[in-house]
Structure formats: C-alpha cells, structure tokens
Amino acid sequence: MFFIGIFGIESKEKAIGSLQNFTCKSCTSNNAKIIKHYNYFHFFFIPIFKWGEEYIVLCDECNSIYSIPKEKGKAFELGKEEISYWDLKPLQIKELPFACPTCGKETESSFDFCPYCGNPLNK
Ligand SMILES: [Zn+2]
Ligand SMILES: [Zn+2]
C-alpha cells in the first residue's frame, strides 16, 4: 500500500473576477484580477476541506498585491457586492524605480542629491 501523495495539503489560487474602476497605486494600470487563495486538504487529489481563505487583488501590469476584507471577497464571489477601490489595502506594492528629474538616471529616492549629476532630488 502506498500512501505517499495520496493525502496532501496544497494551496490554490483562483481568479474569481476582475476589478472595476481600479487604479493601481504603483503604475497606471486600470486592470486587476481578484484572486481567491486558499489551502486545502486533499485525498486522491479530491479536495476534502478548505481553510485559510484569502482574497487578494493583483494588478495586471506591475503585479502589485492588495488585500481585501474576507467578507467583501465572499460577497463579491456570490455576486452580491462589487469591490471598490476603498476596500483595497496595499500588501505588496511594487516600487517604481526612482529617477533623477534632471538627468533621468535611476537612483535611490533616499538620496538628497543625484550621484550622477549632483543636482538635488526634489521629492
Ligand atoms: Zn500596478
Ligand atoms: Zn541626475
């Protein structure tokens, strides 16, 4: 008898819709997917139970991740409610490279002066 691989715990991500009126905090994208993430216990690859459900929003352009309240995500999945911009909590926002306004070279936004051209970096 072989039990290896028969029981298991996996996590799964499923796109359940797309977000209307989305504006990414990090890029100019207006498109984002709503993804449901959950862990499940399976037996012969048949999911037996699920737990740890989470709903996240993923920007199509830059892959920034936002979290949304679980109740909202559930309501959205059931078609009862739309997710609005205000429900989003930034989880992992992709930092855009900071560029010097004078010479345009990428640099650290924590610097006061550009290491390339010496001009002040106004932030
Ligand atoms: Zn984005
Ligand atoms: Zn510069």
Image (cartoon, grey):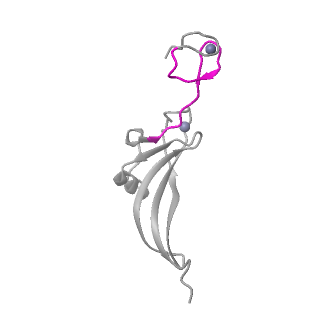
Task: Give above or below for 45 relative to 12.
Answer: below
The x and y percentages for residue 61 are 59, 40
Image quarter where ligand 1 lies: top right
The x and y percentages for residue 62 are 58, 39
Residue at 49 percent of width and 38 percent of height: 93
Q: Residue 2, located in which quarter of the rendered image?
A: bottom right
The x and y percentages for residue 94 are 53, 37
Q: Is residue 94 left or right of residue 116?
A: left
Given residues 37 and 105, the one toward you in this image is 105
Q: Residue 114, located in which quarter of the rendered image?
A: top right
Judged from this view, the residue extending furthest toward the top is: 119
- Which residues lie in the magenta part? 91-112
Count of numbered marks: 0
Residue at 55 percent of width and 33 percent of height: 27
Given residues 81 and 26, the one toward you in this image is 26
Membership of 104 in magenta stretch:
yes
Given residues 41 and 119, the one toward you in this image is 119
Judged from this view, the residue extending furthest toward the bottom is: 1
Q: In this view, does 41 lie to the left or right of 71?
A: right
Task: Give above or below for 76 relative to 117.
Answer: below
Judged from this view, the residue extending furthest toward the front is: 115
Q: Residue 60, located in which quarter of the rendered image?
A: top right
The x and y percentages for residue 37 are 47, 58
Task: Give above or below for 29 relative to 3.
Answer: above
Question: Magenta residues: mostly which secondary structure?
Answer: loop
Residue at 56 percent of width and 90 percent of height: 1
Residue at 51 percent of width and 62 percent of height: 12
Membership of 97 in magenta stretch:
yes
